[in-house]
């Protein structure tokens, strides 16, 4: 048996962008491991990608083009599929204008060459595109306002922190390569506090966990700031390096410490303890992505930004407020920014598509499964079903692909060739196929290039993948991070990332000063469906990342026949664990298996994030389509449900 190893980079929508070492026996991938030479990957992978070969070999893999005939998706040649698509695109543009064509690209692969699809639709149209970002829209917009950028200190600067606050973050599930850094910091004496309404796998990493009321992080941050003001521990230079200082101080003084604490369900002592940690410093805030998926999500992140700034932790090593690492900054963009004739708001995609006038006639989906993953999933499914012609480029037969007229099979993360940045650290790397894709599969760039020719787009780049990679790396190649260096050395730290994001007391806003928030967010307005006999009190629905899936891509049996919901045993007295229950919101209903967890608050219910729609497992049938206060994120977490017998 011939065995060899090959190296690539994981392209999944995950902060870690791991270096992967694949073992192949007679050309078949038999094992995936983390690259021991990658400073962040440190030789291990997450559960879901270690088991990825199983998914790749399963029946959900799409390995040849499929075209709908007589209402069934049937195998077709590339020639048939692409000529059908080209003819339809030209016909619809001629009859209805390019705004009738909607290109939707999500984050299923973070490869930088995936942006070549945007370029195709910009050159052919410009066509309709999505605005907003259901994942991180609110937090990024908040940090852009406050700091003029959303980026972070070097990951390993956390080793200089005296305190780390895991604010709404569960790295043992959704950012596993942060865990060794946290453990190393702890060995050096760093203390960790976790602030999350839920008890979860990372709670035990912290020496102190605060299970606050869902969505009350704004109040908690203001309470902590109030302690700092009252005890004269606000940094003396804060009025100089911050704008809106007086207005912010007035907001903080709207309540006293006890009143702020009461709004969070935490004790005054908890608020004071947290304030001590900010005052002592250096204290780093690691902001999870979960809690900004609320209507007040932007205000929450702005309150954390302000707390970091006024406590004197923003400009020092060991401090900072890390929401995101600007993963694309090392790469040059492929095309000019164009003005789109129409936009569809991602968090409201179903309703915006259904209301579009003139209608959306063609939808092209790249690297996403909106039917499972976007809020108000039933309306999303309906909107896609009603669209005249739908193309899905994916490696898996998803809930969205099943509704397509043409499915285009593309390489999996083990077959792909691309460049990756990361939103959890500053390393960039190349991906290269560790195994050849099945003969019916085409690299996406090749698909766009072929289509561009058929559509007469003479300016569309027809260069080789390597040439495109070199072009994307043009800015950093002169600084030691060109393609050849990446190939030789594996991942390299971006030469554009400084160890500290802001080290000179200035941020990247117009004035160079931090923009402190100066308006309070609205109270959360949500309503629960009417109570039925023996149904629970309204519970806050959490639909968080789970170790076994990446979005809707599950390993193994996935959720099996049925999804589950987890509550405190006292939340639903009289209904035994294991019972199939009905969960209802004002948006929809779902039947799931009841599970108990005595470590949770009594007012929460937890479901997995990526359940399949067609199997009746998607939490998104319960979740209303609502945008966040800024950045057009999706307020997935402002969802109240009642649980009762079937
Ligand atoms: N295993 C796995 N890893 C993943 C993913 C996956 O699907 N599976 N998805 C990837 C993607 S796309 C992303 S964006 C990231 C997701 O990263 P996150 O969104 O950070 O991940 P989650 O674990 O879903 O949620 C983080 C925590 O936010 C908490 N939270 C919710 N509401 C509040 C609140 O009001 N206040 C506070 N303080 N905390 C709150 C939740 O209880 C949860 O513990 O992870 C990536 N990693
Ligand atoms: N209820 C609830 N819903 C949520 C969330 C939540 O916390 N709760 N989290 C939200 C978040 S953070 C996110 S980011 C979204 C994620 O939503 P999606 O991005 O729709 O996530 P996935 O279901 O992982 O779908 C990605 C798809 O991309 C495909 N893919 C992988 N590689 C490639 C490639 O190279 N090219 C192409 N064309 N396709 C590829 C995969 O096979 C997969 O089908 O979901 C959101 N939905
Ligand atoms: S999904 Fe994330 S943790 Fe898992 S291998 Fe990929 S980058 Fe690493
Ligand atoms: Mo995400």
Image (cartoon, helix red, strand yellow):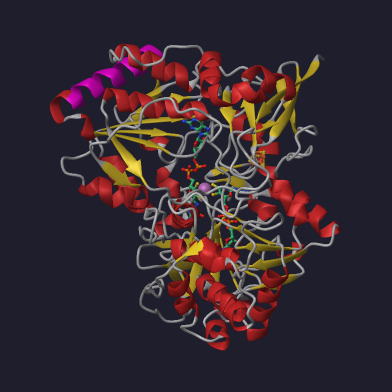
305 is within the stretch colored magenta = no
Position of residue 471 measured from the top left corner of the image (x, y, whole percent)? 51, 19
In this picture, residue 305 sits left or right of residue 191: left
Position of residue 390 measured from the top left corner of the image (x, y, whole percent)? 32, 32
Residues rendered magenta in the picture: 77-93
In the displayed structure, would residue 394 be above or below residue 199? above
Position of residue 125 measured from the top left corner of the image (x, y, whole percent)? 26, 27
Determine the main secondary structure of the stretch shown in magenta: helix
Position of residue 339 measured from the top left corner of the image (x, y, whole percent)? 27, 35
Q: In front: 633, or 600?
A: 633
Q: In front: 639, or 190?
A: 190
> Which residue shows up at 45% across the image and 28% down it?
333
In this picture, residue 207 sits left or right of residue 424: right
In this picture, residue 468 sits left or right of residue 85: right
Instruction: For residue 453, say whether it is visible.
Output: yes
> Which residue shows up at 58% across the image and 68% down it?
310
88 is within the stretch colored magenta = yes
């Amino acid at each position: 048996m011939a065995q060899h190893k090959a190296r690539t980079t994981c392209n999944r929508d995950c902060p870690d962008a791991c270096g992967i070492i694949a073992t192949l026996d007679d050309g078949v991938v038999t094992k995936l491991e983390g690259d021991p030479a990658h400073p962040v990957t440190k030789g291990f992978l997450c559960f879901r990608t270690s088991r990825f070969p199983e998914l790749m070999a399963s029946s959900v893999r799409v390995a040849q083009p499929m075209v709908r005939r007589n209402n069934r998706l049937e195998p077709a040649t590339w020639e048939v599929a692409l000529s059908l698509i080209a003819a339809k695109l030209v016909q619809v543009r001629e009859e209805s204008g390019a705004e009738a064509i909607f290109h939707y690209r999500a984050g299923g692969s973070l490869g930088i060459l995936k942006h070549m699809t945007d370029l195709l639709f910009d050159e052919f149209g410009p066509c309709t595109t999505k605005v907003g970002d259901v994942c991180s829209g609110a937090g990024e917009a908040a940090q852009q306002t406050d700091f003029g950028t959303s980026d972070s200190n070097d990951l390993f600067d956390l080793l200089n922190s005296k305190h780390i606050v895991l604010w709404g973050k569960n790295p043992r599930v959704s950012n596993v390569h942060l865990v060794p850094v946290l453990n190393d910091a702890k060995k050096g004496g760093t203390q960790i506090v976790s602030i999350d309404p839920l008890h979860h796998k990372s709670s035990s990493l912290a020496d102190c966990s605060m299970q606050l009321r869902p969505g009350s992080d704004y109040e908690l941050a203001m309470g902590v700031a109030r302690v700092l003001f009252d005890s004269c521990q606000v940094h003396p230079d804060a009025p100089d390096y911050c704008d809106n200082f007086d207005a912010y101080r007035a907001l903080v003084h709207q309540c006293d410490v006890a009143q702020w604490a009461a709004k969070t369900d935490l004790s005054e002592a908890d608020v004071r303890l947290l304030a001590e940690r900010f005052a002592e410093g250096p204290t780093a805030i690691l902001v999870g992505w979960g809690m900004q998926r609320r209507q007040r999500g932007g205000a929450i992140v702005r309150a954390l930004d302000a707390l970091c700034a006024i406590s004197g932790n923003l400009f020092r090593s060991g401090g900072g407020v890390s929401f995101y690492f600007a993963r694309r900054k090392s790469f040059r963009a492929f095309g000019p920014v164009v003005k789109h004739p129409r936009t569809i708001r991602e968090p409201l995609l179903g309703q915006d598509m259904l209301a579009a006038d003139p209608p959306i006639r063609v939808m092209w989906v790249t690297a996403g499964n909106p039917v499972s993953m976007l809020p108000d999933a039933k309306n999303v499914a309906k909107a896609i079903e009603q669209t005249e012609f739908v193309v899905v480029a994916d490696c898996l037969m998803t809930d969205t692909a099943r509704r397509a007229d043409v499915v285009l099979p593309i390489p999996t993360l083990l077959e792909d060739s691309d460049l990756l940045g990361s939103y959890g650290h500053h390393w960039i790397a190349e991906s290269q196929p560790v195994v050849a894709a099945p003969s019916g599969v085409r690299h996406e760039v090749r698909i766009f290039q072929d289509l561009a020719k058929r559509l007469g787009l003479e300016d569309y780049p027809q260069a080789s993948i390597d040439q495109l990679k070199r072009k994307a790396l043009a800015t950093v190649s002169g600084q030691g991070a060109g393609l050849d260096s990446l190939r030789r050395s594996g991942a390299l730290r971006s030469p554009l990332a400084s160890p500290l994001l802001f080290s000179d007391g200035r941020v990247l806003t117009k004035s160079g000063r931090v923009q402190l928030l100066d308006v309070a967010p609205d109270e959360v307005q949500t309503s629960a469906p009417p109570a039925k006999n023996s149904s629970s009190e309204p519970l806050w629905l959490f639909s968080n990342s789970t170790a076994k899936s990446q979005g809707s891509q599950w390993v193994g049996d996935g959720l099996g026949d049925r999804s589950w919901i987890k509550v405190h045993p006292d939340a639903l007295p009289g209904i035994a664990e294991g019972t199939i229950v009905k969960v209802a919101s004002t948006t929809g209903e779902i039947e799931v298996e009841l599970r108990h967890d005595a470590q949770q608050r009594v007012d929460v219910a937890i479901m997995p994030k990526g359940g399949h729609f067609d199997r009746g497992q998607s939490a998104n049938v319960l979740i209303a389509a609502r945008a966040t206060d800024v950045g057009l994120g999706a307020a997935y977490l402002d969802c109240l449900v009642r649980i009762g017998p079937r």
